[in-house]
Image (tube, rainbow, N blue to C red):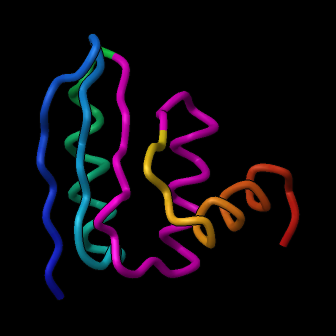
Amino acid sequence: MTFRIQRSMSSGAIVFALSGELDNEHMESLNELLEYEKRSILLDLRDVTLVGRKAVEFLARLEAGGVGIINCPEYVRTWIDAENNGQR
């Protein structure tokens, strides 16, 4: 599976642009990168093509912890919101 993470800065925040399929292995890699950042973090999901339940749970936890999510596909946003509201 192809997955890419591109790091950049925008308006004082670190932006991680994600592309491809977000699976367990990629979540671990992303989580390791996020642990070292001291500034505000944004995840740009514009080019994410597929996410599963575990990925959505992961994204919901990150968002609840203060990570911003931008350019999120509507179906992923709905699922994240349901996770953050305790709905399943």
Q: Residue at x 17, y 72 (%)?
A: 3
Q: Is residue 71 left or right of residue 12?
A: right
Return the x and y of residue 27 as percentages of the image width and height.
33, 63
Give the magenta range.
Answer: 40-68
Identify the image quadrant of residue 25. bottom left
Return the residue found at the far bottom.
1
Q: Where 17 sits versus 10, above or below?
A: below
Q: Residue at x 37, y 34 (%)?
A: 42
Q: Where 68 sits versus 78, above or below?
A: above
Return the x and y of residue 47 as percentages of the image width and height.
29, 66
Q: Is residue 57 left or right of residue 50?
A: right
Q: Residue at x 31, y 49 (%)?
A: 31
Return the x and y of residue 33 as percentages of the image width and height.
20, 42
Q: Which is more toward the observer, 75 or 32?
A: 75
Q: Residue at x 40, y 81 (%)?
A: 50
Q: Where 5 sits versus 48, above or below?
A: above
Give the position of the N terminus as an image quadrant. Answer: bottom left
Give the position of the C terminus as an image quadrant. Answer: bottom right
67 in the magenta segment: yes
Q: Where 51 sits versus 81, above or below?
A: below
Return the x and y of residue 26 as percentages of the image width and height.
25, 68
